[in-house]
Image (cartoon, helix red, strand yellow):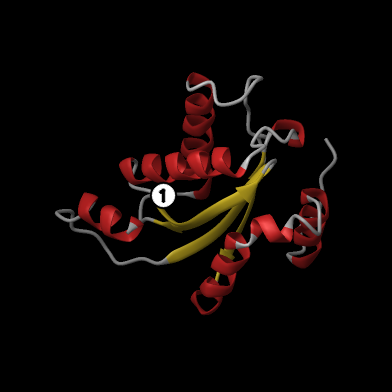
Amino acid sequence: MALAKFLKTIKNKEMPFIKVYIHCVWSTKNRIPYLDSIELRQKVWQHIRENAIQKGIFIDFINGYSDHCHCLISLGVDQNIQKVMQLIKGESSFWINKSELTKEKFEWQDEYFAVSVSESVVGKVRDYIKNQEIHHSKKTFQEEYDEFILKYGFKKINK
């Protein structure tokens, strides 16, 4: 469904064919569990998806938990990770606050995690993102974050 909408918005544009999947993860400011119900999360994920279509950003899959979001994105020819993250996070936090969906002022954390995804494992990444509710009944976002840092060989930089 999302792909059909996206393709309709770019139908008359001539462009190269590119498929670059990126798994992005970002948290709420200070990991505060602002997104404290499934209904609220679904509303936010749906809004992010709809806004992304308007901006020409293809979100393959999105889900998350009370304090973070996972998003599988396919980058377009003229897109980069930093700009896509800025557009998604900035607009969604503005919308959440304007719509008064949280009791306190909502903010996303500035930093994010992004890693490329081989097409051969896109299905596994989708399943991982889809099962966030179950996943986080067993482990915290901090534990998940630490695993990502180790798994992908990122080094923490203390500022």
Circle 1 residues within 10 Å: few <14, some 14–19, many ≥20: few
Q: Which residue is found at the position 43% from the left and 39% from the top?
A: 47
Front residue of 81 and 71: 71
Q: Which residue is found at the position 51% from the left and 37% from the top?
A: 86
**Left or right: where does residue 154 sit relative to residue 110?**
right
Coordinates of residue 49 in the picture (x, y in percent): 42, 46
Q: In which quarter of the image is the C terminus?
A: top right
Give above or below for 153 relative to 31.
below
**Left or right: where does residue 94 sit relative to residue 15?**
right
Residue 148 sits in quarter: bottom right
Q: Is mark 1 on a helix, strand or loop?
A: loop
Q: Residue furthest bottom?
A: 120
Q: Which residue is found at the position 62% from the left and 25% from the top?
A: 106
Coordinates of residue 147 in the picture (x, y in percent): 80, 61
Amino acid, disc 1:
Gln
Tell me, yes or no, if residue 70 can be seen here.
no
Give above or below for 112 relative to 149.
above
- The residue that disc 1 covers is 79
Give above or below for 20 relative to 91.
below
Residue 102 sits in quarter: top right
Numbered circles on residues, count: 1
Coordinates of residue 141 in the picture (x, y in percent): 77, 50
Q: Which residue is found at the position 75% from the left and 37% from the top?
A: 31
Q: Quadrant of the N terminus?
A: bottom left
Tell me, yes or no, if residue 12 can be seen here.
yes
**Left or right: where does residue 147 sit relative to residue 91?**
right
Q: Which residue lies furthest to the left in this view?
A: 12
Coordinates of residue 40 in the picture (x, y in percent): 56, 37
